Image (cartoon, helix red, strand yellow):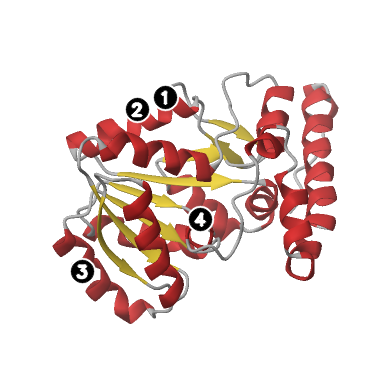
Amino acid sequence: MNERIHIGKCPLDPGTLDQLVQALTDAVERREKRTVTGINAIMYIMTQRDEAYLNLVRQADCVISDGYWLAFAARWFGHKDIHHIAIVPLVFALLDRLRTRRRRVFLLGTKEELVQKAAAAVAARYPGITVAGYQNGYFTPEDEPAIARRINESQADVVLVGMTSPKKEEWMIRNQPRIGAPVLIGVGGLMDIWAGVTAEGPMWLRQIGMMWLYRLIQEPRRMWRRYLIGNPTFVWLICKEWWKSTRPASVDAGKPEML
């Protein structure tokens, strides 16, 4: 794997889906700890505006371009080894690889009835994978040591963290030192897909960067602000970075630093 790059403040790690699946499989086998988080357009905006969130993202072992257009922007900036690796197909491919090795997975997040359905779906979809345990996402920081003990007692190899950002990054970074499972992955709303609450969406839409439109049509009242305001904001921030990158270094050389 090559060196981490940055688009604006946002870090991204290079590599393909196959390379990442192999790296995480190796981490499980060697018991080497890895935290994985994905950045889409909305999270990119957060990295530019929220220093606390940016600091969490920087601490992740692997930061992937979960958004098609972020990967497109990275290639536009000349980073040809940044690929669009969506979290959903990443987890599907990883579990498919690990099921032949009889590995164990712990699900953390969403509502109790939904995480139960997600656990049943994983067990049915990936024979060979053991769902070692599950926990809903409605808990307090005071509950976290007990949850960490449950995860450790389950002997899980992978923990899938189904929370929104920045909660999933906060949980992974804060709890990684006390959890024995080598791989922690922030999966966002994946458990709701497994539970049948939201549809997975056709792969061809993901491949052309239009999955956001599919989700907007599915949940217009919840998603309109995120996409109809967030997407233009993302484009604006990327264009600003491109403009800065094309300016000669001498333009700002003599200007005093703004306080």
How far apart marks 2 and 4 lie (CA) works out to 21 Å
Label 4: how many residues lie within 10 Å, few (<14), some (14-19) or many (20+)?
A: many
**Residue named by callout 2:** 22
Residue 176, image x, y percentages: 30, 56
How far apart marks 3 and 1 lie (CA) works out to 31 Å
Residue 117, image x, y percentages: 41, 67
Residue beneath the point at 26% across and 47% down: 129
Q: Say what amino acid the circle numbered 2 marks.
A: Gln
* Contact flag, marks 2 and 4 (Cβ < 8 Å): no
**Residue named by callout 1:** 19
Label 1: how many residues lie within 10 Å, few (<14), some (14-19) or many (20+)?
A: few
- Nearer to us in this view, 61 or 192: 192
How far apart marks 1 and 4 lie (CA) works out to 21 Å
* Contact flag, marks 2 and 3 (Cβ < 8 Å): no
Is residue 211 something one can see in this rendering?
yes
Residue 122, image x, y percentages: 37, 54
Report helix, strand or loop for mark 2.
Answer: helix
How far apart marks 4 and 3 lie (CA) works out to 22 Å
Residue beneath the point at 73% across and 65% down: 219
- Nearer to us in this view, 23 or 49: 23
Report helix, strand or loop for mark 1.
Answer: helix
Residue 190, labelled with which disc? Answer: 4
Q: Say what amino acid the circle numbered 1 marks.
A: Gln
**Residue named by callout 3:** 150
Nearest to viewer (mark 4 / mark 3): 4
